[in-house]
């Protein structure tokens, strides 16, 4: 469990995200600067997990 949450730290009612230089303080159902990370039931989650985030066709 600690391995999964190593980029997050709990602070007085918030979860601090340390994945980028913004160091957002996330509260329940609120989003950080990236608009991808939030907190549900005191667990930080990423809303686009498992979805395609970019696509490119390279000519041959």
Image (spheres, rainbow, N blue to C red):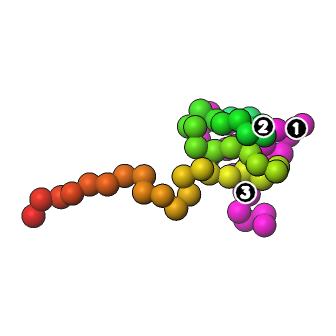
Q: Earlier in the sequence, mark 2 or mark 3?
A: 3
Residue 24, given in percent of the width and then of the height, sits at: 68, 35
Q: For the magenta stretch, what is the residue range?
A: 1-23
Task: Residue 37: give its label.
Answer: none
The answer to whether 32 appears left or right of 48 in the picture is right
Q: Depth check: 51 or 19 in front?
A: 51
Cβ–Cβ under 8 Å for marks 3 and 1: no
- For the C terminus, which image quadrant? bottom left
Q: What secondary structure is marked by label 2?
A: loop
Q: Disc 3 designates what residue?
A: 6
Q: Disc 1 designates what residue?
A: 13
**Number of other residues with Cα within 10 Å of mark 1, as a class: few under 14, some 14 to 19, many 20 or more:** few
Q: Depth check: 15 or 27 in front?
A: 27
Residue 27, given in percent of the width and then of the height, sits at: 78, 37
Which residue occupies 87% across, 38% down?
13
How far apart marks 3 and 1 lie (CA) works out to 18 Å
Q: Disc 2 designates what residue?
A: 27
Residue 29, given in percent of the width and then of the height, sits at: 73, 39
């Amino acid at each position: 469990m600690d391995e999964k949450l190593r980029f997050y730290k709990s602070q007085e009612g918030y979860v601090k995200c340390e994945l980028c230089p913004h160091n957002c303080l996330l509260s329940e159902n609120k989003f950080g600067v990236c608009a991808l990370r939030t907190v549900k039931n005191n667990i930080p989650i990423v809303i686009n997990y498992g979805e395609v985030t970019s696509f490119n066709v390279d000519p041959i």
